[in-house]
Amino acid sequence: MAGIMLFIIGIMFMAGFIVSLRSLQRRFAFQ
């Protein structure tokens, strides 16, 4: 169970990291 929870948390963390990178790229592109 603990391994599955860590796996889900890792996926959510990676998804948030990718979204933040895209928002940063969009911000730099506008500048």
Image (tube, rainbow, N blue to C red):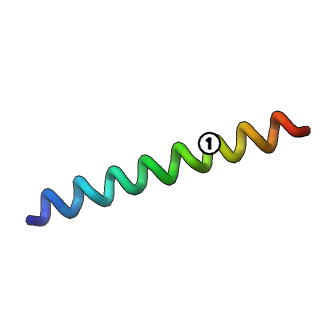
The residue positioned farthest toward the top in the image shown: 29
Side of 1 where 30 appears, left or right: right
- Give the residue displayed 71% in from the left and 44% down from the top: 24
Q: Is residue 2 above or below residue 7?
A: below
- Give the residue displayed 87% in from the left and 39% down from the top: 30
Which corner quadrant of the image does residue 27 belong to? top right
Crowd rating for badge 1 (residues with CA inside 10 Å; few <14, some 14–19, many 20+): few
- Give the residue displayed 62% in from the left and 42% down from the top: 21
Number of numbered markers: 1
**Whole-percent x and y of residue 28?**
81, 38
- Residue occupied by mark 1: 21
**Whole-percent x and y of residue 16?**
50, 53
Which corner quadrant of the image does residue 29 belong to? top right
The residue positioned farthest toward the left in the image shown: 1
Helix, strand or loop under label 1: helix
Three-letter residue code for mark 1:
Leu
The residue positioned farthest toward the right in the image shown: 31
Q: Is residue 28 above or below residue 19?
A: above
**Whole-percent x and y of residue 10?**
32, 53
Side of 26 where 15 appears, left or right: left
Side of 17 where 10 appears, left or right: left
Q: Is residue 28 above or below residue 16?
A: above
Which corner quadrant of the image does residue 31 belong to? top right
Quarter placement of the N terminus: bottom left
**Whole-percent x and y of residue 18?**
53, 43
